[in-house]
Amino acid sequence: MQNRNSFKPVATNLPVLLPIAETAKRNALLERHEGTFRLNLTRSHLIGLIGIFLVLGGTAEAATPAGMIGPFEAIFKWMGFLLWGPEGTLKGFSLNLIISFFSMLVGTVAGVTLGLMQVSLLAPVRSGSWFVTQFFRNSPWLVLLFTIMFLFPYEIDLGFVVIPVPDWIKAVIGFSLPVMANISEVVRGAVRSLPSGQWESAESLAFNRRQTMWMIILPQCVKRMIPPWINWYCILAMATPLCSIMGVEEAVSFTTQALNAEGDRPELIPVFYSFLMIIFFVYTYPIARWSIRLEKKFAVKT
Amino acid sequence: MLDAIAPFFKDLYATTGYNFIIFYEEYEYDRFIEAIGTTINLILASLIFSLVVGIVGAWAQGTKYTVLRYCIAGYIQFFRNTPPFVQILFFYFVLGNFVPSYDAGGYQESIIGNFGWAVISLGFFAGSFNVEIFRSGIEAVPESTKEAAEALGYTRLQSYIHIVFPLAFRVCLPSLNNNLVNLLKTTTLAYGIAVPEMMYTANQIWSDNVNVPEMMIILFLFYVGMVALLVWGMHKWEKNMKIPGYG
């Protein structure tokens, strides 16, 4: 008797749905599995952003009262402050990068561990790590950030030494949690996506489970994991301005401060924020392109 | 409701120190319930707005006017590739300046409040994804199916309602669900412009009562619960809507 689920649509030149339906479904499942959409940045985005910046700047220039500093001059004046913070510190946009870098590091290490726990043979480990993954995947980033900001101690007393925990380190921990959960799911998905023949042939060659994992399965998974991993890094870098709500002195906080210093002139606000967008874009664009290139390079040819 | 649970939570506070004040004090309880209402309103309003944006956008992408098509493409690219938090701030602080205000008894009030701006910016954000989703759904229905409907005497509208839409909708549904879950989580960003939703109210409550850990737990349970409920419901719906023998 034929299994109902294995029933395939009959090949006909009058299809129920066109191939785009399959693509849409595959993309939706991919998105669900990776936990986010794929960034697809192109050069025309940069042109558009610069266009917006110039138009806003031009109108602001025209609206500048006599004797006041113009928008482009103001941007030039504050650029160093926005990018590096005050002399001798690494704040402003560079702090965004530092936060994104460390969160990715912590999130990846924790996420790979959690992901491997999700494919463990022990049922309690499997279900426990599944729960942790789902919990952190499905809670909003802002809630996680707030939790860490308020519940994490501002210093850790080890008895002989007191380690202060500055706000930006708390932000790193807060951002690494959702990254961890999503990377965990990426790892699990990659391990599951390999055909079972890989496991079986490894077994027939007398590999034990650990050897199979480290020598056969994971090396093949790396290729599948790297494009979503880079994509997650871009999403994370774009999300770092969130911690400005908690008063971390990164690019958005400093933009507000610079605008305050210029007397909160309404014509300057859009110019400064669009400039900020350009900075973020210039940073994420090459990385996002690289991810797409790797994806194409690693694609399995069938 | 409050009368039934209040003694337990009061007792819990007295014996263990866990201060779930929202479950035993009238004022905080009302605030909490109101926040749930605002959050659900926010989600529903931005969802409906995003669906409208999606439908209109998908329609506009199929027209023959090149300028309109380019505008929609620019809109999609802009909203997909910039952080939603920056979008909300941009809408509220930049565009909010250009909206006329009226005299509300002593002070000026804008005709679009912060709730309105949150709905608009979240709706445009989610809508930019919906445009592509709907377009792929409509494109997936073959021309021959529409012709077959026409041959059976369906009018254009009837064939759209009975043939094209049901098929297209099934194609859209999985992506739409992803987007919806994403939207639910993004609504917390309305905190940034002081919309009194769950996140904001929780912040107020723990500022007044110094019970951060307890409110955090409530916050987590609320959001994870909402997402779980949504995902479960959507999953069931997707299963029920499956085209028999196809995929």
Image (cartoon, rainbow, N blue to C red):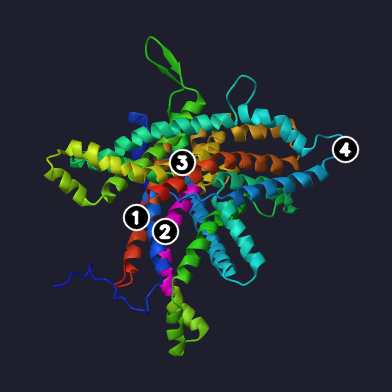
Label 4 or label 1, whichever lies nearer to me, is 1
Rendered-image quadrant of the N terminus of chain A: bottom left
Residue A57 in percent (x, y) is at 75, 44
The amino acid on which the numbered mark 4 sits, given as a three-letter code, is Ala
Please state which amino acid type lies under the numbered disc 1: Lys
In the image, is B176 to the left or to the right of A277? left
The answer for how far apart the CA atoms under marks 2 and 4 are is: 53 Å
Front residue of B117 and A222: A222
Q: Which residue is mark 3?
A: A141
Residue pointed to by mark 2 = B177
What's the magenta region? Answer: B166-186
Q: Secondary structure at mark 3?
A: helix
The residue pinned by badge 1 equals: A301
Q: Residues within 10 Å of mark 1 (few under 14, many from 20)?
A: few
Task: Tell me: residue A86, above or below residue A226.
Answer: above
Which numbered marker is on residue A66? 4
